[in-house]
Amino acid sequence: MAIMQLAIKENDVVELARPFGKWPAGRLGAVVSDYGDVKLVEIADGRGQMLDLIQVPVSELELIVKYGG
């Protein structure tokens, strides 16, 4: 049985697969810009206040929630 890998795009919720910068593996973020193999990910606190914007290779991300097409 084939497993289909969904592409990570803008507005998707992702998880860091490994520590990245000061953020630990497992930290959630939202993709705010899609640059192909690199995504700009917003890290926010529990109230939605932006804490950081980081550029992360798609290979370092796991898709958690897919929004849109």
Image (cartoon, rainbow, N blue to C red):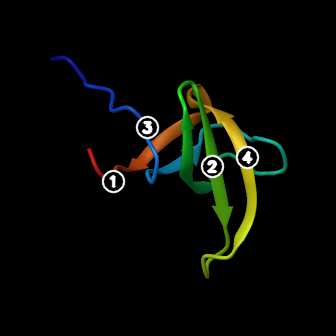
Image coordinates for residue 43, horizontal then vertical, percent: 67, 60
The residue where tag 1 is placed is 67
**Residue type for callout 4:** Ile
For the residues bearing labels 2 and 4, Cβ distance under 8 angstroms: yes
Element under disc 4: strand
**Quarter where residue 27 is shown:** bottom right
Tell which circle, 2 or 4, labels the residue nearer the N-terminal end.
Answer: 2
The residue that label 2 is drawn on is 41
Q: Residue at x 73, y 46 (%)?
A: 54
Q: Is residue 20 above or below residue 52?
A: above
Gap between marks 3 and 4 measured at Cα: 15 Å
Horizontally, residue 33 falls left or right of residue 11, namely right
| Residue under pointer 4 | 54
**Disc 1 marks which amino acid?**
Tyr
Is there CB contact under 8 Å for labels 1 and 4?
Answer: no
Q: Residues within 10 Å of mark 3 (few under 14, many from 20)?
A: many
Between discs 1 and 4, the one toward the N terminus: 4
Q: CA distance from mark 2 to mark 4?
A: 5 Å
How far apart are the alpha carbons under marks 3 and 1?
10 Å
